[in-house]
Amino acid sequence: MHRFAYPNVIPKKAEAQFIGCGRYKAMPSERAGTEDIAVKDGPETPDLSHLRRSVEILAPDSYDSEKIIFEKKDRPDRIYRGNSADLAWLLAHINRARSLAFPNLNYPDDIWCTGIVKFKEQTQTSILSEVDSKGFRIKLNAFLADENPDKLFIAPTANVDDHKLEQIINNKNAELLSLTQFNASDKNSACARKTIIKVLSNEIPALIGLFFEHPSQNTPERKKEKTRRLFLIGAITLLLLLFGGWFIYEYWDKVSPHQVIDSVENGEFAQAAILLKKISTKNAEVSLLREMLDNTIKLTLKFEYRPSDDPSAPIVRQDFTETHNTILNHTHDYRLLITTSAAPMPLYLYVYQEDWRGKADPLFPNPVWNPGQNNPIRPAEFPYYIPADTNGWFYMDKLSFSDATKTVQETVYVIASPWKAKDIEKAYGAIHLQTDPGIRKKKLAQFVQKLQLRQNTGFKCFYFGSFSFQHS
């Protein structure tokens, strides 16, 4: 039973660590084993919407299947997440409705996949992007290791197009082929030795065509069902036009829940409230939206620190309301611990630190400090450390000689809600586009104001917290 496996790496400051594969398989629930976990909502990837849009366009028939995607982890005790799982999940989702055309049963092993799937709305196309190059090299070494029995690895061309990596592959007597070369070969015999298929960014449809049977959408049953559906739609449309036009014009909702969410994500809270009042329809989607907006988010922030040169020293923990007189310097490590007593749904969390120079740094999400960790944070993941690694800490730069006699202030801002903060992401990006210190300072002040707006949105589902400590 072939599975689509994504190799997982935990980045470290010194050296990253390979922790095995998560292995996806689409199958009826009764065929799942004790180690299989249903993945109904998708992988823990930063932007699941790109994956879902890709499936909708490339293989809409997969949503009609009763099969479920299950995941089996090589190391069930570790957390597997990140956008490198995108390609494996996409292929497993398509496998819900379409049988594999390749590989056949003569190939007994799993298929390794890595790559970030992005969807371009303007062109309605899916793009395969490369993953982190350092992490990919570790994944490639794990694939080529003698103890790994799997012989097929699909990877973005941008990751493999490296002379040093090609030399490693050749030294292991493995084969590196483009998708076109592999398609032209005797595919099943080609996997007699370990093979890496490199896929260009625009070759996702060709990859799907290689691995899966074409969907049988033109069977007599489907044609009959389609005809019945079209007749029913036509009849209802005619009735509406003849007898209900005036009613539709006067009373039909012109606002959808998605419009409200779009306003919320862009920081347009007054507009969101106006749109919400215009929705008179009562259905599950509208009820859920109102419930989410009215659900109070309660977070507790703890500040922890210790001397960096003495890891055995006791860790000091303070409530965020007690830190204003705390004095740290470049010889201290520090981190945040966030807990919640009421998080029935995933939360989008953003944490920024403003220093005395008028500079703001993202503490979370941040691929440098929190590699592989991204929004949203699921309820089961709380309490949550930032940095997320239990051995991870932040540190501050040493003050310059001219500032050595000063004690300056560092301020940390925390916001959370069930939705993305697109206005915050955009405003933060605008700060770093400015090279003029005066304009950058003004942009930073506007950015902080946008953060503070979360205190008075009129909705209970937005959390805002801030605290300061001293840097000497």
Image (cartoon, grey):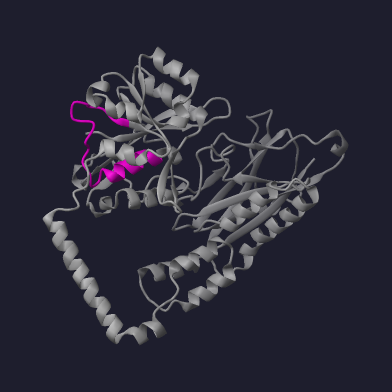
Q: Residue furthest left?
A: 220
Q: 402 or 144: which is nearer to us? A: 144
Q: Position of residue 139 (x, y in %)?
A: 43, 27
Q: Is residue 272 left or right of residue 178?
A: right
Residue drawn at (51%, 42%) of the image: 373
Which image quarter: residue 241?
Answer: bottom left
Residue nearest the observer in this picture, 435 or 307: 435
Residue 70 falls in which quadrant of the image? top left
Residue at the image point whose x is 22% and y is 37% from the top: 100
Q: Is residue 80 visible?
A: no
Q: Position of residue 278 (x, y in %)?
A: 47, 78
Q: Position of residue 39 (x, y in %)?
A: 33, 46
Main SS, magenta residues: loop
What's the magenta region?
A: 86-111
Is residue 407 shown above or below 320? above
Residue 180 appears in view: yes
Give the side of residue 58 with respect to residue 381, left or right: left
Q: Quick check: 233 left or right of 435?
A: left
* Magenta run includes residue 101: yes
Residue 239 is inside the magenta segment: no
Q: Quadrant of the N terminus?
A: top left
